[in-house]
Amino acid sequence: MKVYDVVPGLEFEPETDFEQSPAWFLDGTHSVPPWTPMFGWFWVNFCRNGMQYGAEKLNLPTVKGWDWRFHRGGGYLTLLLVKTEEEKQRREVVFRKAIMPFIEDFDGLWGGCVKEIMGLYEHLKTTDPETATNIELLQNFEDTINTARRMWEIHMYMMYGVYTAYILFENICRDVAKIDDTSPLFHQLISGFDNKVFQVDRQLWNFSNRARKEGLEEVFLKSEPQEIRSKLEATDKGKAFMKDFMALMNEDGWRMQRMSEINLPTWVEDPTPALVNVKQFLQKGGDFNLDEERRKITEKKALCREGGVGQGTAGTKGLVPAAHEAGPEKRRFQRRA
């Protein structure tokens, strides 16, 4: 017997929801295992809003985003289709203009989004839960809700934009070079760009290198994950190591092992998962191989372009960095609120 609604107004109701759409699809990628109530509340409310916001901001010709419902710990969604050819054609006129910033200045567009969302994150981080009053804690929670909403809007607007750029670039490659996204050559053209995941992994590798040089390697290799922090902080070198490590966590550690699962600690609250990554780098040894892989990919990409593949107008070239961001979706908001 259900005692309360997890997502009031957006719980799945067969009598009415099947009238809206005959098919609702389980989001197995994100809601298996089942969501906790707060996870479901945040996701269904704000992912839903973001999907509809992104589709409308770009005026996608064929869809107006997705609608969501919560049911037994899972998220179910259905497309909001544009149903008339007249409306599709009207939206396409607006869409052709709305997609141009992705092609003409992707870095500028993305940089503005990063600046905005990081500013909102920095504001949230100013509240100290150990000293804040109940009023301040409530305000921080309300600010967190608004930040989550805005994060999803930016996420979906950018995601829809780069997916569209990916398709447009593939169409050009199919016409000009007779290749599509099943070709290794196609993926060479859109690979090799740096991203936040690589950057954080590189810094964790740097800490593994530091641990080796400072004689802290054995602390990592001979300790259980939950023991690493306390054993490091038992020595002067280890304390200095952890001070710098936690500075990195305060910048790039506002993430959980499962995104949007607010019941789980962030790396800032419990850096054990990040310290385990350092341990794994120590166990593996060697250099940071992703840099070498990026170098090889960049060289192959240059050879492709020397051969004429990926060349074209400025607009065509502008599709490459935008298309890269969709292949696959590049986890641009690892540090979700």
Image (tube, rainbow, N blue to C red):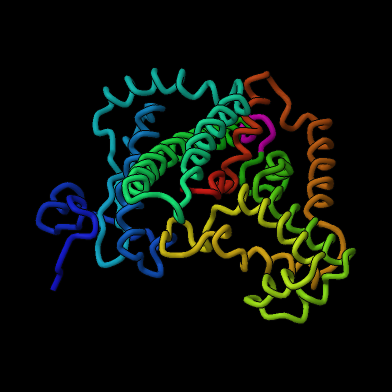
Q: Is residue 233 above or below residue 82?
A: below
Left or right: 134 as drawn, with respect to 132: left
> Which residue is nearer to you in this view: 97 or 201?
201
Left or right: 177 as drawn, with respect to 218: left
Most common SS among magenta residues:
helix
Please report the residue visible at 67 percent of the width from the left and 29 percent of the height from the top. 176
Please report the residue visible at 54 percent of the width from the left and 61 percent of the height from the top. 269
| Position in image of residue 46 (x %, y %) | 34, 45
Is 177 a magenta residue? Answer: yes
Please report the residue visible at 58 percent of the width from the left and 46 percent of the height from the top. 330
> Which residue is nearer to you in this view: 314 or 182?
314
Q: Is residue 197 above or below residue 84?
A: below
Q: Is residue 295 above or below residue 289?
A: above
**Quarter of the figure with the N terminus:** bottom left
Is 310 a magenta residue? Answer: no
Q: Where does the magenta region start and end?
A: 173-178
